[in-house]
Amino acid sequence: MISYAGGMIRLWPLLRRLMALCLLIVGIAWSGTAQAQNCGAATSQGSAPASWQTYCWLNLAQYNDSTARSASGQNLSFTLTDGSLLSFNIRVTGGTGTAYNAVTSPSWGGSSVGNASFIGIPGRPILYTASGGVRTITMSGITIVPPSGATASTFAFVVADAESSNDGEALRLGTNGGGWQVLDVSPPISGSALPLISGVGSSNVTISGVGGTVGAHILSSNSPSTVTVETTAGGLQGVMFAVRFASIRLEKLIVGPRVDAADQFRFEVVSTPTNAVLSSGVTTSTGSGPFTAPGISMAAGVPITLRETMESGSVSTLAQYNSSLTCVNITGATRPGLPNNLVTTSVDLGQLQFGEALVCTFTNVAHPRVRLIKQMGTDGRRFASNQFTIRIREGETVIAQTTTTGTGTTIANGDTGPVQLVGGTTYTLDEIAAGTTSLGNYIATMSCNNSFGGSTTALPNTVGGTIRPQLGDTITCTIINTRRAIAVLEITKTSTIISDPINGTSNPKLIPGAIVEYAITVRNVGTARPDSNSIVILDEMPENMAFATGTPVSFTNGTPVSGLNTFNPATMVTYSSAAGGAAPYTYTPTGSFDANVRGIRIIPTGRMNAATSATNQPNFTLRFRAQLQ
């Protein structure tokens, strides 16, 4: 209030009347505009309760006060977000002249709805009194016709204080449906004052104004066919209407990096019977979200399906992501049977249950991808023809591999590219020599990095290490081979059946009495020579085999020659009779075939030559025979 010499003036109603005059002028300017009757949710929560998107506020843009004040009233219908058609007759009585104007939200600067909360309600959802006094709005013949494939069901008809009920002002609500229940309270723009309310749970509720800046009550009656609202305006009053049966809001969350930065997702709520899209959203940029589709307030039992697809312009496919869906009820307990971390890209939820306010979230995480790359050290290859095969294996199964080409430090075909793997499965990252290459001529190191910063996956740091990638991992590992100059001895052992007691030397078989010749080949594939007299060969005699003493160990130089001294079996070969062929090597074989020989030690003298290329590798072969007992 403000004072002057002759008394006091109430400033609050005066300001509201000035605001009403502005709105009336705007309303006249809009009078020729035709808008489809529909409903919509607020676009921003503000300080509203969690259920702020569950209300489908009726757009009263086609309200005509003159028609509504006539004896027959005005018939209105609204296409709701779930495809239902809401219809009723609205009749206004009391007072003279214009009763209400349909205006946008907020109705004025002090109202709770539109300023403090429920921000961005579309259209003109508020019937705002044109002057003080008592007016009555009667909505009769309220019906909801569900869309094709849906069933009629219980619905909530919602009435809310759309202005500010102050001293001397009131709203009186009547219904022939279920008793009025307070659904939510919209807090004031400042403070915590609320109008008084009585009669909750009955067919008649009174909201009585109080002084100051106040909030607003939001009430509902289940499935009425007639609703009345009496407004008592000292300054001005406003009322707004909404419907809901249940509601759903679909969100999208992306965990970790996308497979490709261009990947985007479309997520939709659709009518299961008609496939009509009821609400949809599209992700943007490279952010993780959550991205939100507009909430839908359901007015009938419409079976719905939640689904997601890749948006046009994406590089990857949906199969390259793990998609899961979780739904929670934000207004109460979440009923069993709703998706809970369900791996899916589409699910038929069926009909929502009355009163539910579901928030469902599609969470997308890229399936783990591992990339293996081959590089050479600064000195390049040991021999020009050296090549390498890098592999990603699951057990003994090769998931991906590539064999290099090129010479020197140049590596071509040395990248597996990103390989999609299964989260939680163990893989081995290794390399093998290709062709005549010997890995012994190189020191191999491996380093890995993961572009998913939130990952806890342990990364291997040695060639042949294992990795157990998780969803979202994008891992790159690089194997670098640096050449070294050392002697690298490769040893192979083969066996050949020479004869048997029945077939002789003609296609002999490995039967008792058969003679078997063993050949041990030693090859230096390295570029350095081993120390003199440093080569020691220990060979364990196989079970049930008796050493042939009549054919002692022989030595044959290969091409190129080994460079070792002339072989002397009398001084360079010793035998063991110990289990496993272990030391001491002091046993002397006897007879033609000696089963006591369990091990042979061969120590040639001299210094073996070094390899000069991948194919010019000095070598020698040792041979001896034994009989199967």
Image: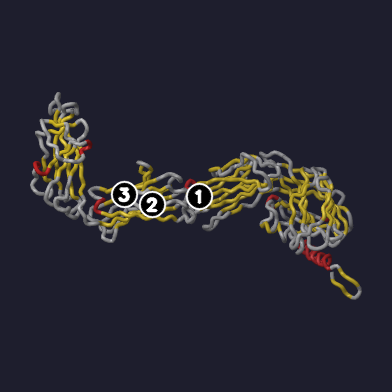
Residue farthest along the right direction in this orientation: 6
Residue farthest along the top direction in this orientation: 502
Q: In this view, does 300 lie to the left or right of 381?
A: right
Q: Name the residue under label 3.
A: 431
| Distance CA(mark 1)–CA(mark 3) | 30 Å
Residue farthest along the bottom direction in this orientation: 5
Q: What residue type is labelled 2?
A: Pro
* 507 up-or-down from 491: above or below: above
Mark 1 or 3, which is nearer the eye?
Answer: 3
Mark 2 or 3, which is nearer the eye?
Answer: 2
Q: Does label 1 or label 2 sit earlier along the sequence?
A: 1
Q: What residue type is labelled 1?
A: Val
The residue that appears at 22% across and 48% down in the rendered structure is 436
Query: Can residue 83 be seen by looking at this rendering?
Result: no
Secondary structure at numbered mark 2: loop
Q: Mark 1 points at which residue?
A: 365
How is colour applied across the structure in the image? secondary structure
Q: Name the residue under label 2.
A: 460
* 279 up-or-down from 550: above or below: below
Q: What residue type is labelled 3?
A: Glu
Q: Residues within 10 Å of mark 3 (few under 14, many from 20)?
A: many
Tell me the quadrant of the picture where the C terminus can be found.
top left
